[in-house]
Image (spheres, grey):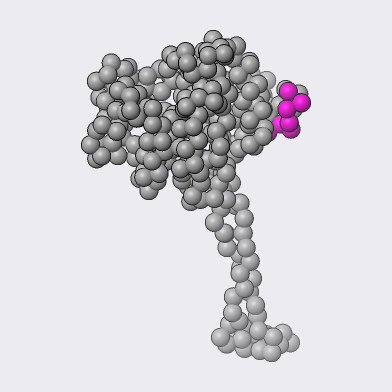
Amino acid sequence: MPTFCNGDRTWALHAGQQAVSLPAPSDPAAHSGPGLGLAQNPLRVQLRRPVPPQPPSLLAVFAHPDDESLLAGGVLAQHRASGARTGVVTTTWSPVSHRADELRDALAVLGAGSPRMLGYRDARNESSAPDRSRLCDTPVGEVVEDLVVWIRRFRPDAVVTHDALGQMTGHPDHRSTHQATVLAVEAAAIGSFLPEHGRPWHTRALYFATHTESGADPLAAVLANVGKSTLTVPDAYASVTVDVSEWLPLKWQAIQAHRSQVAAARPLPGLLARMPSAQREDILRTEVFTRMSLGPVPASSTVLTC
């Protein structure tokens, strides 16, 4: 059973049950009473036991091809192995670029379907989508509308995206994707918003992939070697910490599918590819998420409460 949505544990454990018939007691007469005739009609007791719960469907929304594998590749593989629907929306890079082909290969490894690319231009790469505006320059409402369409089509139980810091490096595309996704998850549940783009959908959980102060040291040291910053959140912000060791081979294979990034000097896939495997596995084996509460809370007073 995946541990990712442990905040929804009660819901998951009650996802389904099946009836099991037990054999009749070995001495029916011992359980009989006057006129019951249980010796001739052995008691058959019906007990119910929970069946394995259906894991939550998961839609990941990230800025660049390779973010999905680096930040949530283990969780995506974990959920898919458990029978859940998984998918990925990527906000930048053209669907006809070489990185779209790499993304397709990575998603095939993770079992996350075909690429869903919004096609905005990467803030730091003019060739990523020459005919489109940069994501960070695009009005957030436009990006929100694009994401609402995909959320209503996929209808996920949970959505995972970047944290508000833009991960450790604070990339502007990460931050823009975070902002648009938060708004889109809420807007997708409101029927009066873009009714022409499908029925409203209420996502049960929204998670931010993040890095904690105590857990970021190994990766921070690697990034510092190429002049990249380190932005982390307090440990208390970690709602879910997932050990993805079991799915680490798939996660690393998906990262390697982003061949242009593995071959380059500064991107993280390239940095990981050039380090000892034990060091790389130490960095990749844990994925950390902060959960955001969703949905309206019924009014209980006339003042704001916590």
User: Could you say which is closer to the camera, residue 212 or residue 121?
Assistant: 121
Q: Residue 229 placed where, x, y %?
A: 32, 17
Q: Residue 285 placed where, x, y %?
A: 34, 40
Give the quarter of the image for residue 49.
bottom right
Going 24% across and 40% down the picture, which residue do you hit? 278
Going 36% across and 39% down the picture, which residue do you hit? 252
Q: Is 239 left or right of 281, judged from the image as shown?
A: right
Whether residue 43 is visible: yes
In the image, which residues are magenta?
194-201
Q: Is residue 60 above or below residue 233?
A: below
Going 55% across and 46% down the picture, which residue do you hit? 84
Going 56% across and 37% down the picture, which residue do you hit? 114
Residue 41 highlighted magenta (yes or no): no
Where, quadrant-wise, is the C terminus in this rendering? Answer: top right
Q: Residue 155 placed where, x, y %?
A: 64, 37
Give the quarter of the image for residue 143.
top right
